[in-house]
Amino acid sequence: MCGIVAYIGHRQAYPVIIKGLKRLEYRGYDSAGVALLNHGLKLYKKKGKVAALEEITVGKDLDGHIGIGHTRWATHGEPSDRNAHPHQSSNGKLAMIHNGIIENYAALKSELIKKGYVFHSDTDTEVLLNFIEDIQKNNGGTLEEALRIALKRVVGAYVVVLIDKDNPDTLIAARKGSPLVIGIGKNEHFLASDASPIIEYTKEVVYVNDYQIAIIKSDELILKNLGNERQTPFIQKLDLELAAIEKGGYDHFMLKEIFEQPDTIRDCLRGRLDVQQCTITMAGIQNNIEQIKNANRILIVACGTSWHAGLIAEYIIEELCRIPVEVEYASEFRYRNPIIHKGDMIIAISQSGETADTLVAIEKAKEQGAVILGIVNVVGSSISRISHAGAYTHAGPEIGVASTKAFTAQLTVLAMVALKIAKERETISHDRYLHLLEELNDLPEKVSHILARAEHIKNVALKYKDVINALYLGRGYNFPVALEGALKLKEISYIHAEGYPAAEMKHGPIALVDESLPVIFVATKDAYHEKIVSNIQEIKARKGKVIAVITEGDETITGMADDILPVPEADEVIAPVISVIPLQLFSYYIGIAKGYDVDKPRNLAKSVTVE
Ligand code: F6R
């Protein structure tokens, strides 16, 4: 949520910042801005995407070797030129970018207004900036000292980066609750919300921790805590290639990421699954296996698509491991004073590893003694760092705002984790264990098989592109897939869609059914097949249009449905990885047909670092 980039060094800062902002646009894209220092402070900002900012800077003075840039996802104040970052302090000396929310901004603002400050935007950021200026004015100390004092009074989450006209060789940054990575080059430093703007310049990075302040010159990086004590930067090597964050010939990142799934699932299984040896190797789980296998209860916390992966994991873990599982929205869990017993295990699922609600939820659970297992995609992210144990999903950077490949990788990892626990607890027979390992092994090929039939899915999608509502139904393992299908359609095509357990339909939603309502059934062959066939009949009897994701060769449903989206046969434990693929493509093609920017749907942001 909001992307920040900053540069200090021997290069021109502007091109580095603009390129970086484009890479971070998935985080927010309602306005963008840049501030450069060079014999004074120059500030350019514009409502709209980074391209709009570039347009207004044509022919302008863009010289400068130090600068900060921002792409915004609005929290305080509508998207507009004046609310775009960077903001400038009242005395005109400081410029600042901010990602996060200052919760006590209203109180700080009224204090400042009483002192005569005038505000030019509706943002919490301008309040914090003038608060810092005011402290510096009154205390007469350095900007670093003023920032430290200000942050002790701030309630909320932030990454801030400041430049100061009076100190044109220094960037100052601080973090709490939002991500900040610093790339270390030769006599230059790069700051960003994630590593994507940095990798083409350097692979050496430092992940700044909460409550740390960074004082950065071209050739020096100093980290301090809020108590002004120096801390040693922990330099890590990035394991990321530039090609992974480019479109590689596809029209959209979303399409690229959907088509990458055979590879991402393979990457996720690689080095872990060994069908010949009949083993699953996951060091992060193995090292903590005693605690994990003896958990009395598992609580899964996540948001959005990751929460849907959690719902599927509930079915898998309860069936295979016989451990009770509860799945929680992280945003609800964190505020309702949950009861956590010693011996409870929390699984946090997150693509970004930075989702504010999930992060705070596990921090609270950790304080109460729970063991935290993180299933995370972004290596080095906050959730991965505060978890006791975990497994990365290895899906590579997911840039399309709607999650696709991260979801299938989460399901693959969760299935492996469940199988590993089940084996340890001896709650699974050898034959079933081996069968599921083989099923996992076959996944990449089955997903490729579906993708090879994308044209058929496109044709079905085009038939329904003008509908206003859609209902998605599934049972058992496929119920959360119905939720995920509905979420994808909403996000990408702005069509209102709801997901329900198919049998719940009779308790209300069936009232919506008429000849204009498409009902998408996720009805692959599993233990519930006969039941869902009855549900399809109930819809047909009311003249609803039925689109069904079915197992190839399912004549029964083929004879009933208006359109079918066939997928290869799979064990029901693994089936969601397969049955979600046509639903991803269905949403993609409708979004494109309606002319929407599917990679950056309106109002959304990829990494939700505000609550
Ligand atoms: C939907 C989507 C979101 C995320 C949610 C959690 O397509 O991408 O619903 O799943 O914001 O994000 P992570 O997984 O990064 O914690």
Image (cartoon, grey):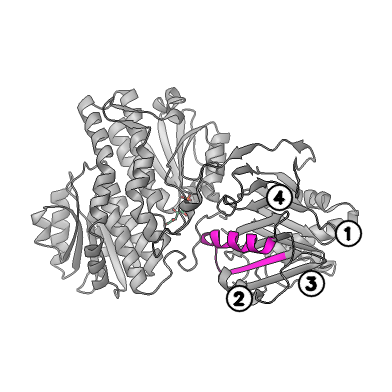
Q: Which residue is mark 1?
A: 137
Amino acid carrying label 3: it is Val
Q: Which residue is mark 4?
A: 188
Horizontal relation, residue 606 to residue 167: left or right: left
Residue 459 location (% of width, % of height)? 23, 68
Please tell me which of labels 1 and 4 falls first in the chain: 1
Front of the two marks 3 and 4: 4
Q: Which residue is mark 3?
A: 118
The segment highlighted magenta reads 13-35
User: Which quarter of the picture shows residue 95?
Assistant: bottom right
Instruction: Name the element at disc 4.
Output: strand
Q: CA distance from mark 3 to mark 4?
A: 36 Å
Please tell me which of labels 4 and 2 falls first in the chain: 2
Judge whether 488 appears above or below 303 on screen.
below
Amino acid carrying label 2: it is Glu
Q: CA distance from mark 1 to mark 2?
A: 37 Å
Instruction: Name the element at disc 2.
Output: helix
